């Protein structure tokens, strides 16, 4: 994947910070098998759970938002989370596509 | 990530300077690496690995470490000949695909900033325009005027400079005539066959945005093949 100079997600992160929001960057750092977004894909989350960008095709974003809010509440600098293949229970968080991804969360401070 | 690192990243991004974000996943410390400069502190011993990621234009974790590298590489230059209707849609598609677009058209009525806001339009003949544009094997050419006076010199330049993608709009017959002219100009069959003509993948559409979509799809596909 080639990161684009025009990709605006980090610019948006800075805009959020300037308006006194707390921001966590969530970045795909590793993938195994077929995962929807490549290494380097990113979303940003604030303390209210508003988010922008993506780390999957909608499969794990909800869980990532929850983890990001926790990170802000607990005031931790960073955390790595992994998502594996989901089983048949549709409500479980996981990647229906059969891939696995590792997402790195970090607060901007 | 520190706020000042984020600000540095935004600065590099807006000035289109190539860089990489290097992050220690253990403690969240990150650093902006610029090619040719030395890494310091914890990152110093990973200089070579970071440079390798940079060369291969990839993102990832350095093997047997907790160092994540994310590279920002200058976009691929795509030169469009002809500030025509299809070009207006191509420019829109290209915005989100990490291509840097330049449009060349010697015809003043076409090459207006009113038709192409926020874009570099070069209102000159291709021969003159190419004197000022750096081109190489990483450049792509999309010829859209199907006017030999304008397209042909650009196609010849692209063939000589070995552009990785060369496409030319026009019917099969137009393309046959074009090939004949290039042959007479001394280009080999191999060179001539490397031109995508008629341009674009087969989608079936005939409207300007549909043709633009078929061209941009072919360009993306060839960019990953190169």
Image (tube, coloured by chain):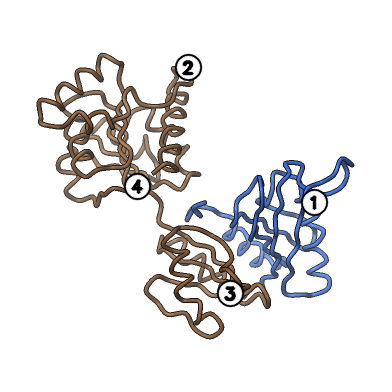
Chain colours: A blue, B brown
Query: How many numbered circles does the render carry?
Result: 4
- Local SS, label 2: loop
| Res B2 quadrant in image | bottom right
User: In this figure, which residue is indicated by the disc labeled 2?
Assistant: B204
3D distance between C-alphas at marks 1 and 4:
37 Å
Where B62 sits versus A9, above or below?
A: below
Seen from the viewer's position, the closer of residues B20 and B224 is B224
Quadrant location, the N terminus of chain B: bottom right
Seen from the viewer's position, the closer of residues A105 and A53 is A105
Tell me which numbered mark, 2 or 4, is placed earlier along the sequence: 4
Q: Are marks 2 and 1 on the same chain?
A: no
Q: Position of residue B119 (x, y in %)?
A: 37, 44
3D distance between C-alphas at marks 2 and 4:
27 Å
Residue drawn at (66%, 74%) of the image: B28
Seen from the viewer's position, the closer of residues B91 and B177 is B177
- Local SS, label 4: strand
Q: Are marks 1 and 4 on the same chain?
A: no
Residue drawn at (23%, 50%) of the image: B133
Q: Are marks 3 and 4 on the same chain?
A: yes
Q: Position of residue B199 (x, y in %)?
A: 35, 26
User: In this figure, which residue is indicated by the disc labeled 1?
Assistant: A62
3D distance between C-alphas at marks 3 and 4:
30 Å
Tell me which numbered mark, 3 or 2, is placed earlier along the sequence: 3
User: In this figure, which residue is indicated by the disc labeled 4?
Assistant: B77
């Amino acid at each position: 994947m080639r990161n684009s100079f025009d990709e605006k997600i980090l610019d948006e992160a800075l805009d959020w910070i300037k308006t006194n929001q707390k921001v966590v960057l969530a970045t795909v750092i590793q993938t195994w098998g077929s995962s929807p977004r490549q290494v380097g894909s990113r979303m940003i989350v604030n303390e209210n759970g508003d988010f922008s960008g993506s780390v999957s095709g909608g499969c794990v974003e909800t869980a990532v938002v929850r983890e990001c809010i926790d990170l802000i509440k607990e005031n931790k600098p960073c955390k790595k989370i992994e998502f594996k293949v989901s089983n048949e229970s549709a409500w479980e968080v996981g990647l229906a596509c059969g891939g696995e991804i590792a997402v790195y969360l970090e607060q901007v401070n | 990530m520190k706020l000042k690192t984020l600000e540095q990243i935004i600065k590099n991004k807006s000035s289109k300077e190539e860089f990489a974000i290097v992050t220690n996943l253990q403690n969240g410390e990150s650093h902006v690496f610029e090619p040719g400069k030395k890494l310091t502190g914890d990152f110093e011993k990973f200089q070579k690995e970071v440079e390798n990621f940079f060369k291969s234009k990839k993102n990832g974790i350095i093997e047997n470490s907790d160092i994540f590298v994310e590279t920002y590489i200058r976009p691929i230059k795509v030169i469009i000949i002809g500030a025509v209707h299809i070009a207006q849609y191509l420019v829109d598609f290209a915005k989100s695909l990490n291509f840097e677009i330049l449009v060349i058209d010697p015809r003043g009525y076409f090459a207006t900033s009113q038709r192409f806001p926020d874009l570099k339009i070069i209102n000159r003949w291709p021969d003159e325009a190419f004197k000022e544009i750096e081109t190489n094997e990483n450049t792509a050419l999309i010829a859209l005027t199907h006017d030999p006076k304008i397209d042909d010199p650009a196609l010849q330049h692209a063939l000589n400079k070995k552009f990785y993608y060369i496409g030319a709009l026009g019917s099969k017959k137009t393309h046959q005539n074009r090939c004949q002219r290039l042959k007479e100009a001394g280009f080999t069959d191999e060179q001539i066959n490397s031109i995508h003509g008629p341009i674009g993948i087969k989608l079936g559409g005939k409207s300007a945005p549909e043709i633009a979509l078929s061209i941009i799809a072919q360009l993306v596909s060839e960019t990953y093949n190169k």
